[in-house]
Image: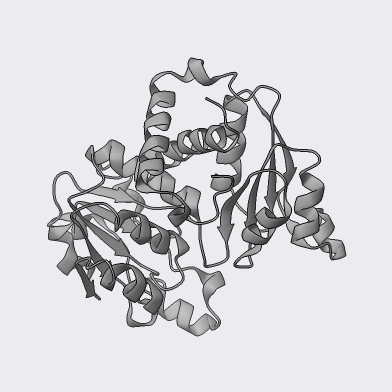
């Protein structure tokens, strides 16, 4: 594996190995503190990001490496019209590995074809966000002790939410996983996810407009925000954004060991009153993101 563009680029065995490495890093951080000494990560972020960019940077620093890059397109030569391919070729002269976020679907794939160093897709438009999915899988594994035999509820924007599409694709390959897909009519799961992943894999799933109806069945609840930037129409956004808000009263029928995940940033789709509930995993999830990215950087750089 040279690059990571799509979570489905990884076999379940490779995912399990990355998770095992990340768990070893958590247990033995000192063992990894010099693993990438002398290596440089370039973060090419053409779109704003807090968690993902800082998580990659923290991951590289904790491996003993260095970081260079930019955090918005305006501060790069993209502002002068330079192509993604040319940027990737140029940066290959300075760095050992690239993490790229771009608003256009497919841009990191184009970069990976031009670059002479590994490229990690850190999010491309509404398409893919594989390191978020690895983060989610590590979190679920640590919270539940397994990745199979569970019921996962995905709630909110299932149409444009790239994190949900990737999570469904990855989790579907583990045995005995079922889904509740909870969204407004306008934001249901895309047809390709329904047919190519769920129906093709004979995965059990239920579509519902009601978070309350799904709640008693769930082992994991994956909340997402209804994203303003993915809407063409402001009126539609305002009408739908509060449809699915998780509040303490909605958890009255939930399992005692429910795990609540969210890729963040949250706007108001999870009440802050839930933050102190032991079932709220989303800040532990952020920390898992750093560790799984450390494991991935090492794997792509061929560091043992």
Instruction: Name the one closer to the observer, 287 or 240.
Output: 287
The quarter of the picture where residue 47 lies is: bottom right
Residue 281 seen in the current view? no
Residue nearest the observer in this picture, 86 or 224: 86
Give how far across and how far down residue 103 sits, in percent. Answer: 63, 65
User: In the image, residue 260 lies at what x, y percent?
Assistant: 29, 50
Q: In which quarter of the image is residue 155?
A: bottom left
Image coords of residue 295 (percent x, y)? 49, 33
Find residue 79 and report its horizontal and vertical position in percent.
Answer: 83, 62
**Residue furthest out toward the right:** 80
Q: From the viewer's perspective, is 228 left or right of 153?
A: right
> Residue 190 occupies which quadrant of the picture?
bottom left
Please report the residue visible at 52 percent of the width from the left and 33 percent of the height from the top: 294
Residue sitting at the far front: 1
Residue most extreme to the top:
30
Between 176 and 252, the one lying in front of the other is: 176
Q: Is residue 107 left or right of residue 169?
A: right
Q: In this view, does 238 lie above or below 255?
A: below
Residue sitting at x 38%, y 53%: 262
**Residue 187 versus residue 70 in the image, above or below:** below
């Amino acid at each position: 594996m040279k690059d990571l563009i799509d979570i489905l680029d990884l076999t379940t065995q490779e995912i399990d190995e990355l998770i095992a490495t990340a768990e070893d890093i958590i247990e033995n951080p000192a063992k990894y503190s010099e693993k990438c000494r002398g290596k440089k990560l370039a973060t090419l972020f053409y779109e704003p990001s807090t968690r993902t960019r800082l998580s990659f940077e923290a991951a590289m620093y904790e491996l003993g490496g260095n970081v260079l890059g930019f955090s918005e397109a305006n501060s790069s030569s993209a502002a002068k019209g330079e192509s993604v391919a040319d940027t990737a070729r140029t940066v290959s002269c300075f760095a050992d590995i690239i993490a790229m976020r771009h608003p256009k679907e497919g841009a990191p794939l184009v970069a990976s074809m031009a670059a002479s160093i590994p490229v990690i897709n850190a999010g491309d438009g509404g398409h893919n966000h594989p390191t978020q999915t690895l983060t989610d899988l590590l979190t679920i594994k640590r919270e539940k002790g397994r990745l199979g035999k569970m019921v996962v509820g995905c709630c909110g924007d299932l149409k444009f939410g790239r994190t949900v599409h990737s999570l469904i694709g990855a989790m579907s390959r583990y045995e005995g996983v079922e889904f509740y897909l909870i969204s407004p009519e306008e934001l249901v799961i895309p047809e390709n996810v329904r047919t190519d992943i769920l129906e093709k894999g004979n995965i059990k799933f239920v579509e519902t407009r009601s978070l309350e109806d799904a709640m008693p069945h769930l082992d994991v609840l994956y909340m997402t925000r209804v994203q303003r930037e993915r809407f063409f129409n402001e009126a539609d956004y305002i009408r739908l954004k509060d449809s699915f808000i998780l509040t303490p009263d909605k958890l009255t029928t939930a399992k005692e060991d429910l795990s609540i995940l969210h890729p963040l940033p949250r706007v108001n789709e999870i009440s802050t009153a839930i933050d102190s509930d032991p079932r709220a995993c989303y800040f532990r999830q952020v920390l898992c993101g750093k560790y799984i990215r450390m494991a991935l950087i090492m794997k792509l750089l061929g560091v043992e």
